[in-house]
């Protein structure tokens, strides 16, 4: 399970300076980038660490490529897990007290009540964006966020397309009610059998032709989010590739 991989990749620093602005949607503080108004809006749901320079950089890339407003709602209200608290190397190398404390705190982000509240937040965000004039609203999520967006692609069509990047706890079962196009971009640390099962499941759905799947078999869980090491050539290559695929995926889905 890649929730465990979340605990294993060392912290990475970034010198990137985001080019966006602060905003607020449905009472939730946002990072926003791209045109202030656009026909469509793409929502980014960050990983368990909350806001990071690497995640904002990805949003800036998507916004420019798609010429579309992209927002990152702070659904953690500034309380993402501090990436600097992650031990060097594998979590199993940390002392027992540290290991147990990290696992306990990570678990809180996956608690049913916490997830239900965040799903409610995101439905409100989508509703507010549409009320403000957005014709189509898409969402992509990283790690923890990837798990969450899978639950938002169902028949109520809160979002018009969903994408997950190195999702935590990847499970094809989460897509049994999928009703909108999906992109699933996984790392070497996600279970390959679940990615394959998801792809097979989507083949049977009307959205199959608009959906996309790719496995980044040389990159670690977190390569596109807070622990993207863009000084690593392989990581940088895959980071640039996935952030080129995302805007193309959403543009195709929105145009259908």
Image (cartoon, rainbow, N blue to C red):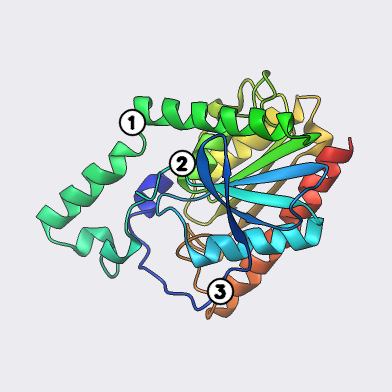
Q: Is residue 96 above or below residue 16?
A: above
Earlier residue among tags 2 and 1: 2
Give the SS element for disc 3: loop
**Is 10 positioned to the left or the right of 139 in the image?**
left
Q: Which mark is residue 249?
A: none
In x, y percent, where is residue 38?
80, 47
Q: Residue at x 77, y 45 (%)?
A: 250
Q: Is residue 82 above or below residue 1?
A: below
In x, y percent, where is residue 99?
19, 54
Residue pointed to by mark 2: 75
Earlier residue among tags 3 and 1: 3
Quarter occupied by residue 180: top right
The answer to whether the residue labelled 3 contacts the one labelled 2, judged by CB atoms less than 8 Å apart, is no
Q: Residue at x 28, y 70 (%)?
A: 88
In x, y percent, where is residue 57?
60, 66
Q: Which sits in the foreground, 194 or 55?
A: 55
> What is the distance, in whole Å, between disc 3 and disc 2 at their CAs?
22 Å
Residue pointed to by mark 1: 111
Q: Residues within 10 Å of mark 3 (few under 14, many from 20)?
A: few
């Amino acid at each position: 399970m890649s929730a465990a991989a979340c605990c294993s990749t060392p912290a990475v620093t970034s010198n990137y300076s985001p080019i966006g602005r602060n905003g607020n949607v449905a009472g939730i503080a946002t990072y926003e980038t791209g045109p202030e108004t656009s026909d469509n809006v793409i929502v980014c749901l960050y990983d368990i660490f909350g806001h990071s320079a690497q995640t904002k950089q990805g949003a800036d890339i998507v916004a420019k490529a798609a010429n579309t407003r992209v927002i990152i709602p702070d659904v953690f209200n500034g309380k993402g897990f501090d990436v600097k608290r992650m031990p060097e190397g594998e979590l199993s190398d940390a002392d027992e007290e540290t290991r147990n404390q990290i696992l306990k705190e990570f678990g809180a982000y996956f608690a049913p009540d916490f997830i239900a509240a965040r799903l409610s937040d995101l439905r409100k965000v989508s509703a507010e964006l549409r009320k403000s004039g957005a014709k189509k609203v898409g969402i992509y999520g990283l790690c923890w966020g990837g798990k969450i967006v899978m639950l938002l692609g169902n028949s109520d069509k809160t979002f018009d397309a969903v994408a997950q990047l190195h999702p935590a706890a990847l499970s094809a079962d989460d897509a049994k009610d999928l009703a909108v196009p999906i992109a699933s971009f996984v790392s070497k640390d996600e279970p390959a059998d679940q990615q394959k099962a998801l792809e097979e499941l989507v083949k049977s759905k009307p959205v199959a032709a608009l959906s996309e799947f790719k496995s980044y078999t040389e990159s670690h869980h977190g390569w596109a989010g807070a622990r993207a090491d863009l000084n690593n050539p392989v990581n940088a290559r895959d980071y640039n590739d996935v952030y080129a695929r995302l805007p193309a995926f959403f543009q195709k889905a929105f145009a259908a």
